[in-house]
C-alpha cells in the first residue's frame, strides 16, 4: 500500500459521506465526499460505514494457554478490531511473553493483568491464595505499566474454589494500592453476586453482565438488583464479555426492557468460541445488539468512544486529523442470519453487520 491514499465515499455513523485522506500512517484530512484528489483512491461508493477502529475490551490473546487463548491478529484486525484488550489471560508470571508476542502482531494490544500470578495457565487461578502475590504484581506493572489498563479478577465458583469472596477483597486492595481499576468476571456463586457488587468502585468493570446464570445481576422477575443500580450510580462500567457461557438473549432482553444499558460490547473471544461459536467474531456479537433493537450509533459507541474513554485513551475513539489512522470499515446488510447465545437459544435477524476492511496503524487491509 502507498504511503498516501484516500478512502472515498465512506459513510459516517451520522449518515454523512466523507473522504478520508491518510498520509504516512496518519489521518491527514477528512472532507465532504468527492473533495479529495490523490493518485491512490479506494472508492466505497457510499455503501460502507467508517468508524474509529473497533476496540474489544475482553479477549484472550495468549495462544500458549488452552482453552482461553487465540492469535492476536485473528481476533484483531482480521475481524475489524484494531485494538484488543487481553482480559487477564496472563498474570505476573507470563505478562512478559504476552507483551513480546504483541511485537509480532499488527493488532494493537492492551491488557488487564490477572491478579493471580499464574493467569489462565490453570482455570482455577484464584483457588490458591498464595498465587495472589502483590510483589510480583507490582513488578509486572512497573515493567509494562503503559500497556496494563487494569487488574482482572475472575470471581466465580469454579475459579475461586473454597475461597469465596476473599480473592475479590485482595483484588480490591491491589486495585487501591496501584490505582488500576478492576475488571471483574461474574458467574456462578458462591460468592453471591450482591457481595461482589458491593465491593466495586467507580471505573471498575463488570464483564459478563448479561450472563444467563442463576447468580446474575437481575432478580427472578427480571428486574435489576438494587445492588446493581447502586453500583451503576457509583460509576461502575458494564461490559458484555459474550464468551462461551456469558451472554443470554433472555437476560439481554430484560436489561433492555429495564433500561440497564451496556457501556462496552466485547466478545470474550478465544479459539474455540471463534471457530465453533457462539461468539464467532465481533461483527457477529454486534449483530446481536442490532437484533435487540439498539441503534447503530449506540452499538458502535460500545466498541469505540465508550471503550476509548474508559481506557483513558480518548483519541482511540475519534477520527481526527493528525492522529494515527486506525479505522474500521463495515456495512449493514439486509441478509438474514441465525444468531446464537451462550444458552443454546437462537434468534433470526434480518440484518447483519459485516466487516469490509480496516486501516491499522495507517495500513489499509480489505477483509
Ligand atoms: Zn470470564
Ligand atoms: Zn474471558
Image (cartoon, rainbow, N blue to C red):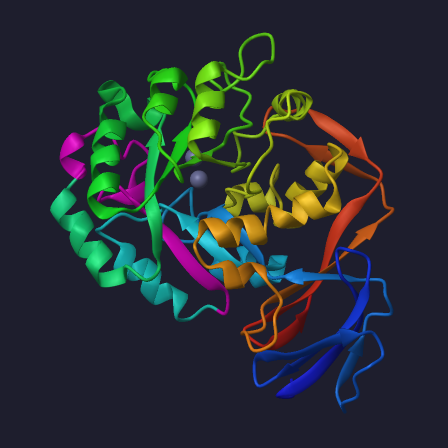
Image spot of residue 265 (x, y percent): 58, 42
* Residue shown at 50% from the left, 65% from the top: 107
Q: Residue 324, how many percent across, how many down?
A: 54, 74
On-image quarter of the N terminus: bottom right
Residue 275 vertical placement versus 148 (above, below): above
Q: Image height check: is 286 above or below 218?
A: below
Residue at x-position 21% and y-position 51%: 93
**Residue at left offset 83%, top offset 74%:** 33
> Where 301 sits versus 209, above or below?
below
- Locate ligand 2 by image quadrant: top left
Residue 89, percent from left and from top:
36, 46
- From the viewer's perspective, is 175 left or right of 323? left
Q: Quadrant of residue 66?
A: top left
Q: Name, please, the residue furthest toward the front.
A: 233
Q: Nearer the viewer, residue 61 or 210?
A: 210
Q: How many marks?
A: 0
Quarter of the image for the C terminus: give it: bottom right
Give the answer, above or below, for where 358 lies relative to 269: below
Quadrant of the image occupied by residue 293: top right
User: Where does the magenta region start and end?
Assistant: 106-132
Q: Check residue 123 for magenta coloring.
A: yes
Residue at the limit of the structure toward the top, as seen here: 221
| Residue in front for this viewpoint, 143 or 305 | 305
**Is 14 colored magenta in this rendering?**
no
Residue 189 visible in the displayed image: no
Q: Position of residue 96 (x, y in %)?
A: 26, 60
Residue 14 in sight: yes
Amino acid at each position: 500500500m502507498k504511503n498516501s491514499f484516500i478512502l472515498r465515499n465512506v459513510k459516517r455513523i451520522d449518515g454523512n459521506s466523507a473522504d478520508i485522506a491518510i498520509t504516512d500512517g496518519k489521518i491527514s484530512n477528512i472532507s465532504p465526499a468527492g473533495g479529495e484528489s490523490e493518485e491512490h483512491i479506494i472508492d466505497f461508493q457510499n455503501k460502507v460505514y467508517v468508524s474509529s477502529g473497533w476496540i474489544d475490551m475482553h479477549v484472550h490473546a495468549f495462544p500458549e494457554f488452552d482453552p482461553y487463548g487465540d492469535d492476536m491478529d485473528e481476533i484483531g484486525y482480521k475481524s475489524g478490531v484494531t485494538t484488543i484488550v487481553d482480559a487477564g489471560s496472563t498474570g505476573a508470571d507470563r505478562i512478559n511473553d504476552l507483551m513480546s508476542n504483541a511485537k509480532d502482531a499488527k493488532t494493537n494490544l492492551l491488557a488487564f493483568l490477572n491478579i493471580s500470578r499464574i493467569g489462565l495457565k490453570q482455570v482455577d487461578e484464584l483457588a490458591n491464595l498464595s498465587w495472589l502475590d502483590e510483589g510480583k504484581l507490582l513488578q509486572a506493572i512497573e515493567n509494562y505499566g503503559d500497556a496494563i489498563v487494569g487488574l482482572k479478577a475472575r470471581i466465580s465458583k469454579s475459579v475461586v474454589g473454597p475461597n469465596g469472596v476473599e480473592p475479590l477483597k485482595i483484588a480490591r486492595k491491589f486495585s487501591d494500592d496501584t490505582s488500576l481499576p478492576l475488571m471483574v468476571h461474574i458467574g456462578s456463586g458462591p460468592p453471591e453476586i450482591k457481595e461482589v457488587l458491593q465491593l466495586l468502585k467507580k471505573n471498575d468493570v463488570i464483564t459478563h453482565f448479561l450472563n444467563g446464570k442463576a447468580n446474575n445481576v437481575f432478580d427472578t422477575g427480571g428486574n435489576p438488583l438494587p445492588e446493581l443500580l447502586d453500583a451503576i450510580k457509583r460509576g461502575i462500567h458494564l461490559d458484555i464479555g459474550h464468551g462461551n457461557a456469558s451472554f443470554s438473549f433472555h437476560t439481554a432482553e430484560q436489561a433492555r426492557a429495564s433500561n440497564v444499558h451496556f457501556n462496552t460490547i466485547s466478545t470474550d473471544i478465544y479459539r474455540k468460541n471463534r471457530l465453533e461459536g457462539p461468539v464467532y467474531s465481533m461483527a457477529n456479537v454486534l449483530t446481536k445488539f442490532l437484533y435487540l433493537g439498539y441503534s447503530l450509533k449506540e452499538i458502535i459507541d460500545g466498541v469505540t468512544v465508550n471503550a476509548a474513554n474508559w481506557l483513558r485513551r480518548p483519541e482511540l475513539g475519534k477520527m481526527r486529523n493528525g492522529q494515527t489512522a486506525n479505522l474500521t470499515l463495515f456495512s449493514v446488510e439486509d441478509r438474514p442470519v441465525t444468531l446464537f447465545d451462550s444458552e443454546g437459544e437462537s434468534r433470526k435477524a434480518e440484518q447483519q453487520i459485516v466487516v469490509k476492511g480496516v486501516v491499522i496503524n495507517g495500513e489499509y487491509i480489505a477483509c
